[in-house]
Structure formats: structure tokens, C-alpha cells
Amino acid sequence: MTKKKYYFMSGLPRSGSTLLSTLLNQNPEIYSGPSSPMLGVMVGAHENFLTNELYLGYPKPDEANKVIGSMIESFYSDIKKPIIIDKNRAWTGRMPFIEGYIQPEELKVIVPVRRVDEILTSFLTMVHRNPFKEGQAKINYIDEVLIKTDTPMNDENRCMHLLNSGGILYDSLHTLKLGIEDGYKECFHYVDYNDMMDDPQGEMDKIYEFLGEKSFEHTFEGLVNKNREKDLEVYGLADMHEVHSVLKKTSPPPSTILPQSILEIYEQNRLQLEFWTEPLVPKIQPKKFGPPETKAISYNLFSNK
């Protein structure tokens, strides 16, 4: 059985990752699914081995590595396509897990990005069009945090939650910055949402060039996300991963949606928030990682950062 080739997708929310997966799935050689649990499962297994009394009493590091490394193959055993793109926003902050356990020939991560004010605008418009209805199992996950922390439910507080630790936008920015600081900048290929809207085939060609794969002519009409997640049940937002049938930008201008205080915060902190934009990202020389001398689990290589 031919071993599958693995690439990864990480990046920022509301920046077109679902759209990218929908387009990549048009290619008969590529499978790009919804957000994947594999990173969390691998981290959990790794930490269990390091703290499990029974394992510590009789460690088998080579076998433990094989168990963790085989998880992704098992998870995608139902997929017949030879190329898999596993999507998780935390991959950029956990690059050694790819390097040490999955061990692809090259570390390559597609990173969708977007102006932060546009991301906040997209979140607010999505929350506004998905009001909570009586009998619904779950309120949207942003307002759920505000309720639990006894914070007034308004757009300013929604944005502040997203921009602070624990908010999905902050956490995604943080993990991306970790990857850059750890020397993996050259492993990332940024796909700007607005560039994708302006020249979709051109941006797809750049992705294929980055991956080293043959380009594919895509269709940008009649789009359907065939890997829909249970958005309403899990996130409280019925259309969180919906893809419009025709590729087009639908979010209103940030100035018409965002509170004035948030617009000011964005303008004052734009360079820090959008740190991936050249030439603002510092030129960091990637660390040289050779194959480990053994496949033993390392307490240092995969430690939390």
C-alpha cells in the first residue's frame, strides 16, 4: 500500500480555509477535509506516555513513537486520494510534532491570512445573522464566553474577546507567531484572502508551486463544501463553514460594522497584529533539524511552549 503524502493547513479564522479546502478537493489527487482533531489526539497521546506510570515503569520509546506516528494514517485510512492536507489552526505552533512523528519529506503548511479588521467584521456579521433561537441547543461560542464571564453582550466585547488570550483570533495569531519565532518561517505559504478573491487561479497556482505539486485548473462557480461540520450543534453558528456557490467577497467594509473603539485599536496595532506582512516579519534563519538519532520520545523536542 502506497503511503500517503501529507501537507498541512493552519492560519487565521475567517480567512478562507474552508474555501481553500473546497477548491483543493476538486483536484482528484488531493483530499482537504474540515478542521482535523489529529493534532490534539497526538498531543494527548504524547503527554499520556510522558506521564503514564505504567509506561514510565517499562518505557518502550520506539514503539510509543510508532503508535503516535501511525495515528494520522489510521485516521485517513478511508481516503483513497494520495495527498492529504490536514487542517488545524494550531499546527504552526506545533511544527516539531509534524517533524518528529509524521516525518514528511518536507514541512509545508498553507497559511490563510486576512486583514484583522476584516476578520473581526466577518465574525460580527456571522453572529448577527445567527441570533439565538428558543429551543436551540447552543448559543454561539463567542457569546457563550461573554455569558460565562458575566460580560455585557455587545460588539465591542465580542471583538475584545476575539483579540485577547483565549479568543480564537488571538490564539491563531499566537500559534503562527510561535512557528515564525521557532524558525519555521520558510515552511509557511501565506494565502491572503483578498488576493484569493482577486485572482483565485493565480493563488491556487502559487499553492501548487509551494507544495511542489502539478497545477490543476479549478472551477470557481457551483462551489459546495461537501465536508460540512455540525456548525449549529458545536459552534452555535449554522453557517460557519458554508461556502458561497460563486467565489466572491461578501463581508461589508469594517468601518460600517466595527465599533469606533475597535477601529482605533486596529489602526494603532495593525503592524503588530499583521506581523506576517513583508517586510515587517523579521528575517529569521530556520533552525536545522536533522532526523533524531533514535525515535525515542524527547521531553525537550516536543515540550509545550
Image (cartoon, rainbow, N blue to C red):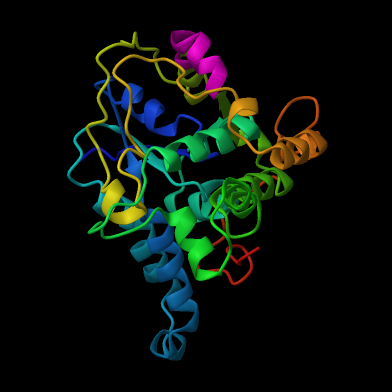
Is residue 173 rendered to the left or right of residue 4? Answer: right
Q: Tell which of 193 and 149 is nearer to you.
A: 149
Is residue 290 in view? no
Residue depicted at x 42% and y 20%: 213
Residue 293, placed above or below residue 4: below
Q: Tell which of 79 and 194 is nearer to you.
A: 194
Is residue 4 rendered to the left or right of residue 281? Answer: left
Residue depicted at x 26% and y 60%: 137
Q: Is residue 127 magenta?
A: no
Measured as percent of width and height from the top left, residue 294 is found at 52, 63
Question: Which residues make up the magenta segment?
Answer: 193-204
> What secondary structure characterizes most of the magenta part?
helix
**Quarter of the picture holding the C terminus:** bottom right
Residue 71, placed above or below residue 120: below
Q: Quadrant of residue 48?
A: bottom left
Is residue 285 rendered to the left or right of residue 292? Answer: right
